[in-house]
Image (cartoon, rainbow, N blue to C red):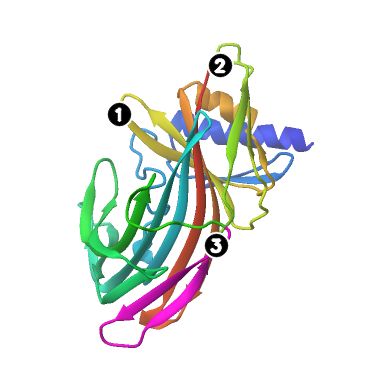
Amino acid sequence: MKSLIKYFLLLFFLGSFFSCNNPQPTALVEDTDPIEIEVITKNSAEPTSFGVDSTGLRENPGRFTNVISIAGIKETVRGISNKSSFAQAAFFDRTKPIYGLNGKLIGYSTLAPGKVFFDNEEAKIRPYRIRYGINKDTLIGFRYELHKRTNLGDPFDFVFNSKINFRFEPFVSSTVSFDIATPPEIYLNYRMSGSKANKNLNLLLEWNAGYVKNFEILLSVSDKLRNIVFPLYNIKTSDDGKFVMPKKLLEELAARFDKIVFTLTRKFEKQQGNGISQLYVISQSINSIPVEIP
């Protein structure tokens, strides 16, 4: 019965997406582990988001009062991983909203009200741009940032399964300081068999199980004609070290795309303070891998 339920839901869900580009917001599927599939891009012809950026945040951080974000990011290609370390602090002035061309709220202007440090390294004040729609971005102000890519850039290292100290020295009030816990590192690989020509594709993602509660898999696809990668689904599942790609979903994607990018994220989140001093703190361990479809 579970197998029948699984395939019925998948066929209904995929048929909605690929025929009319208007899927249900969420589809539930049962496999070895229960998984939840959330639609991110409803119309692949006009994607409105573009996967994980340098911050590791997919959603618009402007919906929070203030954001402190740190991330250890890896991109694994053919067994070789390139690592990046990222830290940012953004303070939003919610009295100054920013609207897109269609009148939709896309964020708020930012403030630079003091000095910010991560593990005693002072963050740099840099322009803060957010992207929305296709090839549209806008400057919303400035943010505090440290960014190191494969040993180049700022002197900041994201240490996995540890803690990083955050310190804020505002110009007009007392210093705020606390430690941010970091999730364990992810070591990601995959096994693919079959081919789309023979309609016998099978795909297994494998990683070191961490059993972190807040864990997700972002599934993105590559559009070669427009030279973009955009997310289709966000998958909630267990951090148990394995994920069997639903066969019907894999076949439907293989019919339209030659490459799928999987991004696994372990995430720690917390709220610090309250009112206008409220901080949304997020710490992430991220590993992405592209999968070519034979």
Query: Which amino acid lies under the numbered mark 3 shown in the image of this protein?
Result: Phe
Q: CA distance from mark 1 to mark 3?
A: 34 Å
From this viewpoint, which residue is outermost toward the right? 1
Q: Nearer the viewer, residue 81 or 151?
A: 151
Q: CA distance from mark 3 to mark 2?
A: 38 Å
Give the quadrant of residue 108.
bottom left
Q: Nearer the viewer, mark 1 or mark 3?
A: 3
Q: Residues within 10 Å of mark 3 (few under 14, many from 20)?
A: some
Specify whether residue 176 is painted magenta. Answer: yes
Which residue is the site of mark 3? Answer: 268
Query: Which amino acid lies under the numbered mark 2 shown in the image of this protein?
Result: Lys
Q: Is residue 180 above or below residue 272?
A: above
Return the disc, 1 or 3, that comes first in the chain's sequence. Answer: 1
Disc assigned to residue 196: 2
Q: Is residue 172 above or below residue 243?
A: below
Disc assigned to residue 226: 1
Q: Which residues are magenta?
A: 161-182
- Name the residue: 36% across, 39% down: 47
Return the disc, 1 or 2, that comes first in the chain's sequence. Answer: 2
Q: Nearer the viewer, residue 139 or 106?
A: 139
Query: Which amino acid lies under the numbered mark 1 shown in the image of this protein?
Result: Arg
- Name the residue: 71% across, 39% down: 31
Which part of the image, by quadrant, shows the N terminus? top right
Element marked by disc 3: strand
How many marks overall?
A: 3
Element marked by disc 2: loop
- Name the residue: 77% across, 38% down: 2
